[in-house]
Image (cartoon, rainbow, N blue to C red):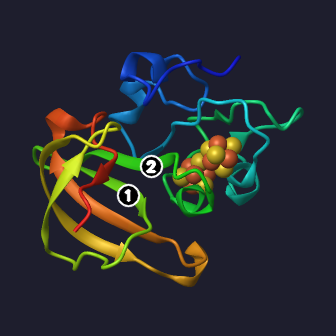
């Protein structure tokens, strides 16, 4: 499909029509990648990073990335690989009433595990409080920190990042 022509961040309705955004019923069952890549740019590290073959860009390289929901295990390798910070992994039923997001975070200082933080939407607006579960700085992430944070399920699709410390 063609990329979206919009000003600012896309709405959830706009994202739901793109090939990288998972079906919400499927997304509520298991951890899965949300690929929020909506412009036809020449880029494909997500495709090469995914060891499961769950992301296809193909040719031309300006295609929007397409997610194969059945192949995605929610491993988050693509989250660190994306230079556009456009991919998150979310788990709807992380624990009772709470979801989990794994998002790239390129600022310092990094949050400490267990810290309460403010989580935000695509426009940078604060939505809710969350708790940092883990900060993954392992070598496989090639120096991109992946923050894991839990947050109320009612904000499942809306939360994409945290307010900078
Ligand atoms: S989360 Fe893992 S399995 Fe899913 S698309 Fe990303 S790299 Fe592939
Ligand atoms: S790596 Fe990121 S910016 Fe590049 S095509 Fe994939 S999702 Fe889009």
Query: Which residue is farthest right?
Result: 59
Of residues 17 and 72, the one drawn nearer to the viewer in this rendering: 17
Q: Is residue 11 above or below residue 139?
A: above
Residue 105 drawn at (x, y percent): 40, 65
- Residue at image position (59%, 77%) is 140
Say which residue appears at 51% left-offset and 59% top-offset: 76
Q: Position of residue 21 (x, y in %)?
A: 51, 30
Task: Indicate left or right for 86 with 59 as reference.
Answer: left
Sequence-earlier tag: 1 or 2? 2
The residue lying toward the viewer, choosing from 89 and 97, is 89
Tell me the crowding category of disc 2: few under 14, some 14 to 19, or many 20 or more residues within 10 angstroms, Cα based.
many
Q: Is residue 37 above or below residue 83?
A: above
Question: In the shown orientation, is residue 56 left or right of residue 161?
Answer: right
Q: Is residue 1 visible?
A: no
| Residue at x 79% of width, y 33% of height | 62
Left/right placement of residue 114 relative to residue 85 reads left
Disc number placed over residue 88 in the picture, else none: 2
- Badge 1, how many Cα within 10 Å: few under 14, some, many 20+? many
State which quarter of the image contains the C terminus: bottom left
For this orientation, the residue located farthest to the front is: 7
Q: In what element is the residue under mark 2? A: strand
- The image quadrant of residue 127 is top left
Q: Residue at image x 70%, y 17%? A: 2
94 left or right of 108? left
Asked if the residues shown at circle 1 and circle 2 are in contact, with their CB atoms under 8 angstroms apart, the answer is yes
Judge whether residue 149 can be spotted in this image: yes
Q: Position of residue 77 (x, y in %)?
A: 58, 62
Q: Residue 63, which numbered label?
A: none
Q: Which residue is mark 1?
A: 102
């Amino acid at each position: 499909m063609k990329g979206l022509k919009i000003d600012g961040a896309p709405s959830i309705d706009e994202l739901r029509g793109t090939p990288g955004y998972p079906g919400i019923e499927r997304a509520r069952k298991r951890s899965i990648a949300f690929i929020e890549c909506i412009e036809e740019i020449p880029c494909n590290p997500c495709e090469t990073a995914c060891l499961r073959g769950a992301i296809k860009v193909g040719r031309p390289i300006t295609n929007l990335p397409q997610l194969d929901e059945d192949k995605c295990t929610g491993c988050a390798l693509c989250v660190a690989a994306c230079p556009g910070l456009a991919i998150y992994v979310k788990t709807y039923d992380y624990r009772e009433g709470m979801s989990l997001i794994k998002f790239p975070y390129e600022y310092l200082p990094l949050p400490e595990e267990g810290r309460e933080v403010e989580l935000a939407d695509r426009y940078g607006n604060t939505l809710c409080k969350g708790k940092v579960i883990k900060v993954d700085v392992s070598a496989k992430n090639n120096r991109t920190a992946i923050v894991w944070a839990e947050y109320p399920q009612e904000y499942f699709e809306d939360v994409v990042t945290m307010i900078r410390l």
